[in-house]
Amino acid sequence: MATRKYRTIVVGTDGSELADATVTRAARIAVGSRADLIIVCAWKEPGLHAKVMFSDVAPRDSRGGTVLGRKAAKKALKAALRIAVSKGAAVQTALLVDSDAADALIGVADAHDAELIVVGVSPHPGLAERILGTVATDVSKRARCDVLLVRSRPTDDETDDDSET
């Protein structure tokens, strides 16, 4: 079976461990396909309550995927950029998007004619995600391109092997 080659890949980050694994997977695919990688971090300004509770971490909205606060989003985006570059990916751009995560990923993918969106999916969704749905579900339903769901951290084999199979 032939592996599809992509020209442009979009990946989202929110600074979580799952996002790091997702960026790693997207970077490896980008290297294997010689594709450009676009990293997206969706963010919104937190309410006063969130500002007080989460002063030193990258808080996310109840649905996940959207970082609360521009400063936290910049930090998450920088970390994702470091990961992608360390894997040898050609990062076309890294974007902070003031939007819901699913809308940001789909909008950027459409604007750049991406052939693939890589998005993380939690193996243990919380109550809000069960009620409202997840970013991964929304993206997989609405995207016009291929969507790869990354479920967990890369295995030791993936960490040690720089080739994409």
Image (tube, rainbow, N blue to C red):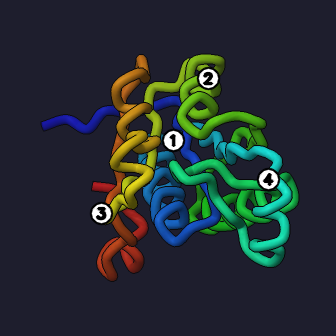
Q: Gap in Å between the C-alphas at discs 3 and 4?
A: 26 Å
What distance separates the C-alpha of mark 2 from that of mark 3? 25 Å
Residue at image mark 2: 107
Q: Above or below — where is 40 with respect to 28? A: above
**Disc 1 vs disc 2: which is toward the camera?**
2
Label 1 with label 2: CB-CB less than 8 Å: no
What residue is shown at x 52% (from left), y 71% (from top)?
17
Give the label on residue 123, or none.
3
Quarter of the rendering containing residue 82? bottom right
Query: Are discs 4 and 1 less than 8 Å apart at CB?
Result: no
Q: Amino acid at mark 4?
A: Pro
Amino acid on which the number 3 mark rests in the picture = Pro
Q: Earlier in the sequence, mark 3 or mark 4?
A: 4
The local secondary structure at tag 4 comes to loop
- In the image, which is nearer the foreground, mark 3 or mark 1? 3
Q: Earlier in the sequence, mark 2 or mark 4?
A: 4
**Are there few (<14), some (14-19), or many (20+) residues within 10 Å of tag 4?**
some
Q: In terms of depth relative to the viewer, which is nearer, 75 or 34?
A: 75
Q: Nearer the viewer, mark 2 or mark 4?
A: 4
